[in-house]
Image: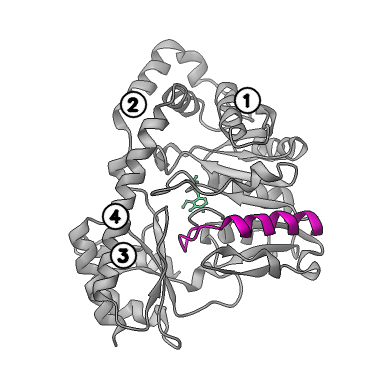
Amino acid sequence: SVIREILKVTARPEVISFAGGLPSDASFPVAQLKKAFEKVLAETPQAALQYSTTDGYAPLREWVAAEKSKSGATIKPEQVIIVSGSQQALDLIGKVFINEGDKVLVEAPTYLGALQAFDLFFPKYVSLPSDEDGLDAEQITAEHAQCAKFLYALPNFQNPTGRLMTEARRQALVAKARELNLLVIEDDPYGELWYTSAPPPSLLSRMPERVIQMGSFSKILAPGLRLGYIVAPEEIARKFEQVKQATDLHTATLTQRAVYEVVKDGFLNEHIPTIRSMYHTQAQAMLSALDEHMPTGVKWNQPAGGMFLWLELPEGMDSEEMLKKALARNVAYVPGTPFYANEPVRNTLRLAFVTVPEEKIRAGVKVLGEVFDG
Ligand code: PMP
């Protein structure tokens, strides 16, 4: 409901919004997509407009499998299910794994959209501690893991915090998952959006037998395509296929074929670096504005990629209360509270910075600085 209230306000053009989770529309490769849709409709119109298989367009599944195999583990096309946005993967995960009262392990904080998807199946969440270096697996106990259906983790430039899980933390998580027999969901829509150096290898590449990875074309092409994928151990992939069939039969045939046309000859190798550099510039503008305008006692991280950063107000301050004052002065953000499955940390908030022009970033952060200064 907080989010709905914010969205009402951010629809007004005078509002500077750091609240949205949208990628920059300046990054959408319109010409390439237009060409690809035209080509598919010209060359294979019947197949592109017909019903198709639930697991997805075979060449696209092969492409995903080949991409994922580059970082070590061999991933077979049979392990890949194409989904209608990775948000659908979260729904399918809920349908396959969660019965009412089942235990699910999540980071604190975690992606709000995952909580919304899982909530429909009434799990019992256990929140795991995380900090600047990402999820702290050392603190996962046998009691946490007992009967847990899975652990949901976001190692790369997490939504909401922008945090990157370090190499040491990844190793610790792999060791812990093996020791406690945990299934891990690795949600990775932002991994390609690093600014100066690539993240450490994925959890999937380290333990493909117990990782379900979700990926998306939303942040590297465009979210309106509604195209993503799940990579899972084969027997789990078949369960997703079954449940997806009941959900929507299959993901849009035309879109899958067009996106395959766009990615098949390496277009992303030239396209993604342009997004990285655009977002890096935006992040630098946000960081320098924060340096200039935030009062002492306010802390924030230095994201190494992605679209978000996480701000911590002085102890005792409530970011939801502060939001009312910020909105009254036409600046929006998302308070930290909805990103916590259990006990919220009330003095935190998320700032999204990739869609706001630089001069508005400066103006908006100046207002926030004054609001947080009381
Ligand atoms: N996971 C995370 C962490 C996200 O931030 C998002 C988009 N905001 C999604 C999944 C869903 O993305 P999509 O359905 O567009 O692939």
User: Label 1: few (<14), some or many (≥20) within 10 Å?
Assistant: few
Span shown in magenta: 158-179
Residue type at the position of mark 1: Thr
Residue closer to the observer: 350 or 239: 350
Q: Which mark is residue 53?
A: 1
Q: Please, what secondary structure does the residue beneath circle 1 have?
A: loop
Residue 249 in sight here: no
Please identify, in this view, whether the residue under mark 1 or under mark 3 is nearer the observer.
3
- Disc 1 and disc 3: Cα gap in Å? 46 Å
Q: Mark 4 points at which residue?
A: 282
Residue type at the position of mark 4: Gln
The answer to whether residue 64 is left or right of residue 5 is right
**Residue 36 position within the rendered picture, expressed as x and y whole percent measured from the top left:** 38, 22
Q: Please, what secondary structure does the residue beneath circle 4 have?
A: helix
What quarter of the picture does the N terminus occupy? Answer: bottom left
Vertical side of 111 occupied by 60: above or below: above
Vertical side of 299 occupied by 236: above or below: above
Vertical side of 286 occupied by 336: above or below: below
Label 3 residue near ligand 1, CB within 8 Å: no
Label 4 residue near ligand 1, CB within 8 Å: no
Q: Mark 2 points at which residue?
A: 32
